[in-house]
Image: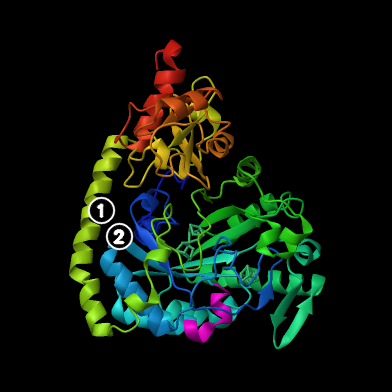
Amino acid sequence: MSCSCTSTTSTQSELHASILQKINNHPCYSQDAHQHYARIHVAVAPACNIQCNYCNRKYDCSNESRPGVTSYKLSPEEAVKKVLHVGGLIQQLSVVGIAGPGDGLANPKQTFKTFALLKKYAPDIKLCLSTNGLMIHKHIDEIAKYNIEHVTVTLNTVDETGEIGSKIYPWVFYNHKKHRGVEGAKLLLEKQLEGIRMLVERGILVKVNAVLIPGINEDELPRVARKVKELGVFVFNVMPLMSKPEYGTVFGLAGVPSAGHKMLMRAQEACDVNVKMMRHCRQCRADAVGLLGEDRSDEFFKESFEHKSFEELSEHYNLNQRVKTHDAIETWRRALRAANGKIMQEEANKNELSTTGKTHLVAVTTRGNGLINDHFGSAKEFLIYEAGDKGIKFIMHRKVEKSYCMGKEGCDGSYPIDEIKTALSDCELLLTQKIGECPQKELESIQLTCDEGFADEPIEISVLKGVRKHFFTSIGA
Ligand code: CLF
Ligand code: SF4
């Protein structure tokens, strides 16, 4: 986060320290943390109090999830048992989020019972809540009471006339009544803004998510970003609409298209109005488990924890061992930071990144830990950086449905590379741990240079060195 203060009072630095402490191991609020710490979502909140046209309740909440198979629902007790079970096995687990499949605050009993039990049985874990914002004002005291330090509110428009909102929300259920169209949209906006103000006043870190809906709110998002900034929201996250007829959503069936990488990049740039932007969101499922880039939700069946006692699971969770693991992660992060140096410039513009004003997009394959440690053939997502000879900036990740190899041996020309070529069409350099001759030739055909020379090296310094090596040789950078 950029800070324009020239002198810092002790109160300001204490505030800064307290924010850093809150975000340090939160994989969504800290871009740096997401390579090292994992989150789990527990699906305890099935109902919702509004209808979004990008949502089909058969699937997970689109506020914080991608359409996928329906999650299995959990009671608060089952949810906490799952957290203890998973937290013992995946010790990088640092955050529990309630993100659906409906809305956490439309299911307040289940949500707050889960948080209460987590405070008792997993006191080291951060609590995180995602909501459409309609009911924050009613539950603000409970949110503070359970020390929920992170709340995400989905705010797709700040249009006070309700016109844009009415195209997104057909109805809003409030005070035992369905409010439709413009009336419902205006009511929702009023409650969202009131709720965000209350959260900020209590010192709770707020993230605002906005779904980028082509043809509906793309021109509206910079206004949302400015409002977010004015409200004192910590971070703003633009999530591209994922829309297909088979998702069964109103938008999907009406042919509203998904928002692609390029549209997302344009929207992020337009919204970069001195507000901290989240660029590493993975649009997780309501029952997501693991590092943000991986999805381990299908490894943890209900049968593996539901019959175990809290005592047994608490022992397995092993608080002492978790503290040691987190200490080791922090030691590794310090070493990584030292190796990378101070090159990351989150809010930098092109001129700050490059002496020539020209920058290049670089794709990286990683399995986490801040290293270039994944083969091209197995990568299902690519981190994308914008880089010049002076600095680098993380832009986004790009997922593909199929990795290149899919476990096959040899190269018979039948490998799925078109999707990857499309995803990386504007990139000029790929840094990867290993890549075969065939895919390398394919990628060179779209002017994408592949380089294995930074295998197992720290990502950020390698991106900078890679760009200098390939694109800035003539100026001796
Ligand atoms: Fe979950 Fe959301 Fe908390 Fe993170 S996810 S409730 S803030 S712990 Fe993160 Fe997933 Fe994006 Fe959400 S990557 S969808 S921003
Ligand atoms: Fe669906 Fe979430 Fe919108 Fe509710 S708030 S309708 S669950 S996307």
At x 73%, y 74%, the residue is: 187
Q: Nearer the viewer, mark 1 or mark 2?
A: 2
Give the answer, above or below, for where 178 lies relative to 242: below
Q: Single out the residue that lies furthest toward the bottom.
A: 176
Identify residue for label 2.
92
Instruction: Identify the mark at residue 329; answer none if there is no mark.
Output: 1
Q: Based on the displayed image, in which of its 4 quarters is residue 445 positioned?
A: top right
Q: Which residues are magenta?
A: 101-110
Q: Single out the residue that lies furthest toward the front.
A: 412
Give neighbour class at mark 2: few <14, some 14-19, many 20+ (Cα, 10 Å).
Answer: many
Instruction: Identify the mark at residue 55; answer none if there is no mark.
Output: none
- Residue type at mark 2 is Gln
| 354 or 116: nearer the viewer | 116
Q: Main secondary structure of the magenta part?
A: helix
- Residue type at mark 1 is Ile
Give neighbour class at mark 1: few <14, some 14-19, many 20+ (Cα, 10 Å).
Answer: some
Sequence-first tag of 1 and 2? 2
Q: From the top left corner, tell me how far across and down residue 191 is, in percent.
A: 66, 74
Give the answer, above or below, for where 3 lies relative to 11: above
| 64 or 355: nearer the viewer | 64
At x 42%, y 64%, the residue is: 297
Q: From the top left corner, tell me how far across and down residue 172 is, in percent.
A: 72, 76
What is the spatial separation of the Cα atoms under label 1 and label 2, in whole angstroms? 8 Å
The question of residue 108 being in magenta is answered with yes
Question: Circles 1 and 2: CB distance less than 8 Å?
Answer: yes
